[in-house]
Image (tube, rainbow, N blue to C red):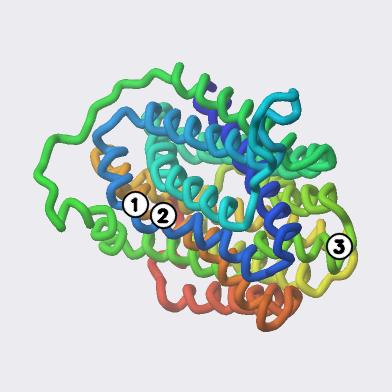
Amino acid sequence: MRMWFARLFGATGNQMLLVAVGWQMYELTGSAWDLGLVGLYQFLPALLLTLVAGHVADRVHRGRIVAACLVAQALVALLLVAATHGFGGAVGVAGWPPFVSRNLLLVASVVLGACRAFQMPAQQALTPLLVPAAMLPRATAFSAAGIQTAVIGGPALGGVIFIAGASAVYATCTVLFALGCFFMARLRYDHSPAPHEPVTLATVFAGVTFICQRKAVLGAVSLDLFAVLLGGATALLPMFAKDILHVGPWGLGLLRGAPAVGALLTSAVLARWPLQRRVGNKLLLAVGVYGLAMMAFGASTSFGLSMLALAVSGAADMVSVVVRQTLVQLETPDAMRGRVSAVNSVFIGASNQLGEFESGVTAAWLGPIGSVVLGGVGTLAVAIAWWRLFPSLAQRDRL
């Protein structure tokens, strides 16, 4: 439960931080391109550092890695408090006036991306060490339920607190990261670092090689990559909230949390009744439903319908998350889990952060509605194509 609470507080703080940075960036620049850059600047460090992070996760206490990443995110949030609110002048002493800017928000995005590069593989590789293998599908669903609770509560809470100003959101994030670090620092498990071996190209790319040699695993992680890369709309939600649905920061928070409502309900069902048979077909079907839901969201001008479409997309995505993460962890020996999880986190990061950049670019060309609808069509096409390209995944019966 310490791990669960640490992830809950850390994920809540992260979600609130991303909502505040996205909204503040759009307020400063009014640019879809800059919203896309926020995602790109988070992804690039994760891409460049992933192989290093995988090696570290296989050799260093994984709980301490996650705790250090939470501390770094807390420091970013503190910096943004000072940048947004100023420092010192409010109490009548010499200090700095507010100095928040587009460039500062992009630098903060880079640091958050670097933290993600180390936190994700260490965090993913921890779960199999804490539960028996037979319980891993349910544990993955239960862990995902906590994350989705954070994804629901974080944006919604962040949107409400944003009424008091961005600095109030950043201050709350600092407290949440500190609580997450507290629980993670108290986590205990038997740490058995991987045997020492010289660093070669083979060891550096061992995670990549491992995934490529297992077609079902490769199909699952690449399916998520292309589906969310094309179908994601997170970066454009400030535009939909402000210009299309005509709701304020509170509406943005609800839109950010809507996919997690569907995901939370689905994770609760999967924790109670885990997938037993025809998991490959169910995975591909879920991705197809995700694409259809994003097409409906892009075409909607009703706030209620948009919320419903996002909730359905979150429910479909949760099926993909549970199948993919369980499949990867069950087929990977512990000595390799850090490196394999690092590669998996790059796929996840590419689908999210790089997907935000892709959304920003296509929105600059086609507008937000055209961008999301076209992305949904692309996701549906990927699900159909993967049925033919990865028959071992489509025919997979059990995890």
Give the label on residue 45, or none.
2
Three-letter code, disc 3: Leu
Residue at point 74%, 66% (across, down): 30
The location of residue 111, given as percent across then percent down, is 47, 46
Which residue position is annotated with label 1?
A: 49
Number of residues whose C-alpha sits closer than 10 Å to that of mark 3, classed few (under 14), some (14–19) or many (20 or more): some
Nearer to us of marks 3 and 1 is: 1
Nearer to us of marks 2 and 3 is: 2
Tell me if label 1 and label 2 are in contact, CB under 8 Å.
yes
Three-letter code, disc 2: Pro
| Quadrant showing the N terminus | top right
Relative height, residue 113 to residue 211 (above, below): above
| 177 and 233: which is toward the camera | 177
Number of residues whose C-alpha sits closer than 10 Å to that of mark 1, classed few (under 14), some (14–19) or many (20 or more): some
| 348 and 141: which is toward the camera | 348
Relative height, residue 212 to residue 81 (above, below): below
Residue at point 43%, 40% (across, down): 119
The location of residue 378, given as percent across then percent down, is 59, 78
Relative height, residue 82 to residue 103 (above, below): above
Tell me if label 2 and label 3 are in contact, CB under 8 Å.
no
The location of residue 45, given as percent across then percent down, is 41, 54
N-term mark: 2 or 3: 2
Residue at point 82%, 62% (across, down): 306
The location of residue 40, given as percent across then percent down, is 51, 62
Which residue position is annotated with label 3?
A: 305
